[in-house]
Image (cartoon, rainbow, N blue to C red):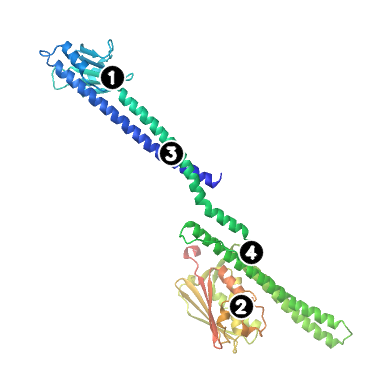
Amino acid sequence: MPVRIKITLLFTMIVFLLLSLLCSSVYYFSHSNRIENVKSRLLNRALTTASLLNQSETFDQALINKIDASTALSMTNKTVQAYNYFDVLIYTYADTPADTIHVSKAILDAARKNKEVFFRIGKKEVLAWCDTDIQSKIVIVAAAYDAEGRNYLERLQFILLFSLTGGILVGLASGYFFSTGLLWPIRRITDEVNVISAKNLTHRIKSGHANDEWNNLTGTLNELLNRLQESFDIQRRFISNASHELSTPLTSISSQLEVALQRQRGAEEYRQVMRSVYQDVRHLSNLTQTLLEFAKASGTPGGIEIDLVRVDEVLMLLPKEMKKIDARYSVHLNFDQLPEQEENLLVFGNAVLLFAAIKNIVSNACKFSNNHLAKVKLSVQHRQIVILIEDEGRGIAKPDLENIFQPFYRAENSRNVAGSGLGLSLASRFIKLHKGEISVQSVLNKGTAFTITLPVADKAAIL
């Protein structure tokens, strides 16, 4: 069922319930008011008749009948009957001859006990009243047909039903137009989103100035489109750069082999060609391995084996690993500010990926420093493990700081140094997989400092 129809039906149902409640209340109170008026009139008639009967020495029954007949009462088919203490009918009057109310002994007893009893017989309202202050305890039964009151209720019932029906129809039409106007921004947003495709990600949904849910939805969708566009741009740059980086060593290998095969050469010349090709193959192998790691870093933590990892133990592997890369590289570890509780050094993560992220940053620090020294400091602050990696190298220019974590991006002052431009991008992705953050501060020709923060594992999870 369309949302417009659902809103229309819901709006109509609410209008129906409200109007039904209003009409029912009006009818109920009008009906109650009519009953009270009828009871008041019948009581006055009973009081008058009882007063006259108690003065039998002055008024006889014929005179009382004349008084009852001449008494103006807005109701028709009046009947008045009086019963003595022994339930014997001692007086009767009726507008219509032979119109008699049959009253049971139970009603008469109830009237003497409760002073008055109101009930209906056919279309007539009947009141049995007894003056309990007088010893005779005569019970006066007054009955009449309230034609005017019933006609008023019938007219009121018709008006209320007409109003209820008209209100439902108005509510149905109002709900339809209301839902149409309410959902119009959704249709507009849908039409604009349908225009957007992978080739047209620059298009954005127009937003209004009102601070409402539709404007918030438009802003959220535009932010989503911004992220998608950024992801597509990164993907395109990655494919372009990866293709270039892979084609360069392949082109070099192909060119060298082609030149070597053009004529007969000596053994030494072939060795030189093989050494050059071997270096290109190693470079190609390292680049391929790095791309595989990059693809792994683009995944989610759900596909990675997660366990408790001690960060200090990971850092202690760095000096030996740097020596493997280059014998000139050295790492100075500073563990002077470690907490007494060992559990504060534990994080949830993958030791291999975490070590790879830190190793990439430390190797860059060694590579771009004149003394090939990286200083690594470990501390814990406010349930956050902080790893500070500093060097005294050439530094990074401010325009380059915003892009150093992009795949294949290389700063201007580092293009003459061998590398693929994937190390920092890998490090950033690995750190984010561990719910951590990485930041950098650098001054040209003085050095660079990378700060990695990782959340300490929850104590409850450790136990």
Q: Earlier in the sequence, mark 2 or mark 1?
A: 1
Q: Earlier in the sequence, mark 1 or mark 4?
A: 1
**Circle 4 Cα neighbour tier, 10 Å, few/some/many (<14 / 14–19 / ≥20):** few
Evaluate whether residue 85 shows in this view: no
Instruction: Place residue 104 in its image quadrant.
Output: top left
The residue identified by callout 1 is: 76
Identity of the amino acid at label 1? Answer: Thr
Q: Rounded to the nearest whole Å, what is the CA distance between mark 3 and mark 1?
A: 37 Å
CB contact under 8 Å: marks 3 and 4: no
Please give left or right for residue 414 compared with residue 48 in the image.
right
Frontmost of labels 2 and 3 is 3
Q: Residue at x 59, y 83 (%)?
A: 365
Label count reads 4
**Circle 2 Cα neighbour tier, 10 Å, few/some/many (<14 / 14–19 / ≥20):** some
Q: Rounded to the nearest whole Å, what is the CA distance between mark 2 and mark 1?
A: 107 Å
Identity of the amino acid at label 2? Answer: Asn
Identity of the amino acid at label 4? Answer: Asn
Q: Rounded to the nearest whole Å, what is the CA distance between mark 3 and mark 4?
A: 49 Å
From the top left corner, tell me how far across and down residue 413 is, in percent. 62, 85
Figure check: 254 above or below 166: below
The residue identified by callout 3 is: 167
From the top left corner, tell me how far across and down residue 418 is, in percent. 67, 83
Label drawn at residue 200: 4
Q: Rounded to the nearest whole Å, what is the CA distance between mark 1 and mark 4?
A: 85 Å
From the top left corner, tell me how far across and down residue 389 is, in percent. 54, 80
Instruction: Place residue 283 in its image quadrant.
Output: bottom right
Q: Circle 2 sits in a helix, a strand or a loop, which is it?
A: helix
Frontmost of labels 3 and 4 is 3
